[in-house]
Image: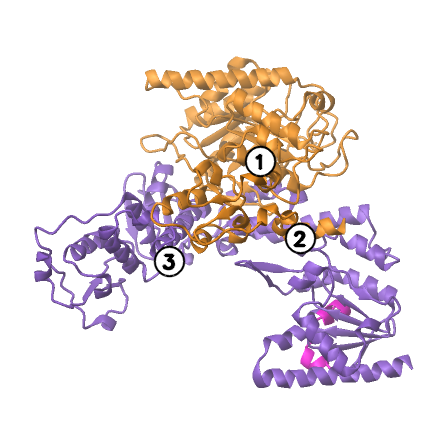
Chain colours: A purple, B orange
Amino acid sequence: MTALQHVKLGAYYVVTLPEPDDFDFWRERARALVQSDVPPDRVAWVEPGGSGNLFSHGERRMPVPDVTAPQVRASRAFVTLAKNAILHTDAERFALLYRLLWRHQANPRIMEDKTDGDVRRIDELARIVRRDSHKMHAFVRFRLVEESDEEEAGEHYVAWFEPEHHILRANAGFFMRRFANMKWSILTPRGSLHWDGKVMEEGPPAQRSDAPVGDPAEDLWRKYYASTFNPSRLKIGAMLKEMPKKYWKNMPEASLIPELVAGAQARESAMVAAGEIKDEARPDTLAAIEKALQTCRRCPIAELGTNPVMGEGLLDAPLMIVGEQPGDQEDVQGRPFVGPAGQLLDMHLAQAGIDRQGAYVTNTVKHFKYVMRGKRRLHQSPTAKEIDSCRWWVDSERALVKPRLVLALGASAARGVLGRTVSISRARGVPKMLDDGSELWITAHPSYLLRLEGPAREEQEKLFTADLAAVAARLTELVA
Amino acid sequence: MGQLTTIEKLEILADAAKYDASCASSGTAKKNSIGGKGIGSTEGMGICHAYAPDGRCISLLKVLLTNHCIFDCHYCINRKSSDVRRARFTPQEVVDLTLSFYRRNYIEGLFLSSGIIKSSNHTMEQMVETARILREEHDFRGYIHLKTIPEADPELVYQAGLYADRVSINVELPTDAGLTRLAPDKNARQIEGAMGEVKSSIIENKDARKRFKHAPRFAPAGQSTQMIVGADTASDADIVGKASRLYDGFGLRRVYYSAFSPIPDASAVLPLKRPPLIREHRLYQSDWLMRFYGYSSREVMQATGTDGMLPLDIDPKLAWALNFRENFPLDVNRAPREMLLRVPGLGVRAVNRIIAARRHHLLRLDDVAKLTVSIAKVRPFLVAADWRPTMLTDRSDLRSLLAPRQEQLELFAA
């Protein structure tokens, strides 16, 4: 209890870190604070350059622990994790570490309890930092600069890299051990490292323009990258998971990816076309379309592993309703427009007096395109290219059903039918003549209505209702 | 035909090498270039320097010395009777490429393999020479993987092990009958004989290093092999059995599976259809069960169906658990580690965390949820302080409850 004598009761301490990654400084201050019995909620940790005046009332002098204060205990697991976690950019990290250190004194085995919130958080921070470091080891790309100064003559390898966290200094050793006999520099927006074969020097933050722009070996490397890729097993998701797009801009080989993917898809679809149907010969029944869809690999959406959702309805339906793409529910049930948007559509169709049973309902894009967000599959809009690849199927359906009127819901559907992008607000309510003599009507997609709220939704619902009413009226004329 | 440029040769010889699955650069002795004359380090963990759009890691410069070959293995794109463009690197050219890529941090090292020219010994000499130049003339301390040729002189294979971190010999096909039919120039006894020699060299070297600190290292990252899946009629049970015999008999670090992919200019003996890629994935999962989860090969085979194939719609661990439901549910607060490892959906990390956390307090279901990826998947197999899966493991539709959704639909569609 003697330590308390040195602490002003209720005093509030402010500790400003000299560097954002200075673990030793943090450890020394944290040790003194614990020994002086300063609880976590009485300490503010401030990053260099962080807002100090927020805590202007705080005490900036450190408390002096009593000489008899007990040793501060910290498990090895904690220290290992803390050394990584402190490199994270999260402004709360110093406080989190101090809170855990504080709790360590009462429970030295706290790190074993991975259900604890603080333990989980430090694990998470350390994991992210380790990944950032690992990606730095992997994705730094040096470029050769030939130096011709009389003293500096020789090869100098320079890299530009953009780490997400404060990992540069911590990883200097890795590059030094690997390239011990090479002169190299790594430039980043947070600082730079220079190794001349003997001494490591730290430099100020750099800009991309400080780094060289190219290297003759990059052509060879790109050729290698393209040649080692096996186009018959495209797995874009697996690539993106380990090599997210944010790294691509500093990797010379990444510029090849779009063309490699496109080439692989062309190859696959050529194989499908050779094995199944030719683009020239359209399937002659809806069943044939459905069968051929199973092997469709015209666009990368099919690689997500979802099921193609075929249109459904009468073969001689006068009305064809075209949506965007199947959603989560549609993919599960294998039928178009059965999810929330489908229910809204059904309600509006009934209101307008249009019989869905008498129409042919389908989608522009046949596969559900999504990204995982936690446990949920989140809808992703198809790209223009994907819509155009899938247009072949909608065209084939139209050629068989021969509707008098096509109702396109949303911009994707309009593009899928027309082959070019139109603006819904300008195109709605005015029919367009299609090549086969049928009429195209364009309106919003019901899921657009679902995303709106309040007056905006009311306004759009009105427009949607009006569009459907116009379609209903026109349909009666056409069929009569 | 004029001389090929380096970039043209690289295109041909990297393309020809890409059917080798392995690109691992992990698990070797720690070394770095401090105090040396050259560059290179290996620090235990492998590094993937890039990923190709096929999702595979690019860690090593994986090339053939040449794709000329006197053998005529039907599944191989480089076989004698194949009509592919041929090229040939000199050892020095491979060395220059490796160093040039390594300096720019594109790669962890070199994975060198080769078609067989003139004779097995001649080819092997060229490969060893490449590794020698890298190690001795350039003091290169990065990773080297040499694919050795089983027909070559054992002395040459031994030389390879002294320069390389890892050596490998492909068994190619899981059954001897398949090998005889599809690789008429190869001999199963000879392949296994060579693997046996490498194994004893590795053991002798470990022993020598215990006694003499400066004894040269021999293949510190061990040896591995590769099997082609789907080119013959071998079932998953055959493959798992073969892999297990290889692990036990030759102390292999890894057995790689390579789904036979339709190669351009394929031989007429081969199936036209490629096996589903998921089959390769299920085999790797079964490999993991044997290596990290304490399953014996016999137990993995218990997960296969009557046709000897692993189910494609669910992973082998779940398949095993469904076949042996009487072992579940397990009490998450009491069950021993080796049993928890058998719970579908619990990985090694999760099990370790559970065991550490339950020393502190009784685990409730939401505690387990914090330690695992998917509580829905593990819940039917566990008892927690506040959770007991009522009759769940007795339900006949448990499999469809747990199978991933899209595959489930395929089952219904069938």
Quadrant of the frame with the N terminus of chain A: bottom left
**Residue, disc 2:** B406
Pinpoint the chain carrying mark 1. Answer: B
Relative to A418, A109 lies left or right: left
Where residue B334 appears, x then y in whole percent?
Answer: 42, 42
Q: What element carries label 1?
A: helix
Mark nearer the viewer, 3 or 1 = 1
Where residue A94 appears, x then y in whole percent?
Answer: 28, 58
Q: Is residue A329 above or below residue A196?
A: below
Where residue B108 appears, x then y in whole percent?
Answer: 46, 37
User: Which image quadrant is residue B335 in?
Assistant: top left
Q: What residue type is labelled 2?
A: Gln
Observer-nearest residue: A242 or A108? Answer: A108
Observer-nearest residue: A168 or B208? Answer: B208
Question: Which residue is at the far right?
Answer: A480
Taking the spot 46% from the left edge, 34% from the top edge, the residue there is B26
Q: What element carries label 2?
A: helix
Is the magenta region chiefly helix, strand or loop?
Answer: helix
Q: Mark 3 to mark 1: distance in Å?
A: 45 Å
**Residue, disc 3:** A189
Mark 3, other Cα within 10 Å: few <14 / some 14–19 / many ≥20: some
Pinpoint the chain carrying mark 2. Answer: B
Which residues fall within the magenta stretch?
A: A413-428
Mark nearer the viewer, 3 or 2 = 2
Q: In this view, does B147 lie above or below A86?
A: above
Instruction: Tell whether position A426 is magenta.
Output: yes
**Residue, disc 1:** B286
Q: Mark 2 to mark 1: distance in Å?
A: 22 Å
Q: What residue type is labelled 3?
A: Pro
Residue B393 visible? The answer is yes
Mark 1, other Cα within 10 Å: few <14 / some 14–19 / many ≥20: many
Pinpoint the chain carrying mark 3. Answer: A
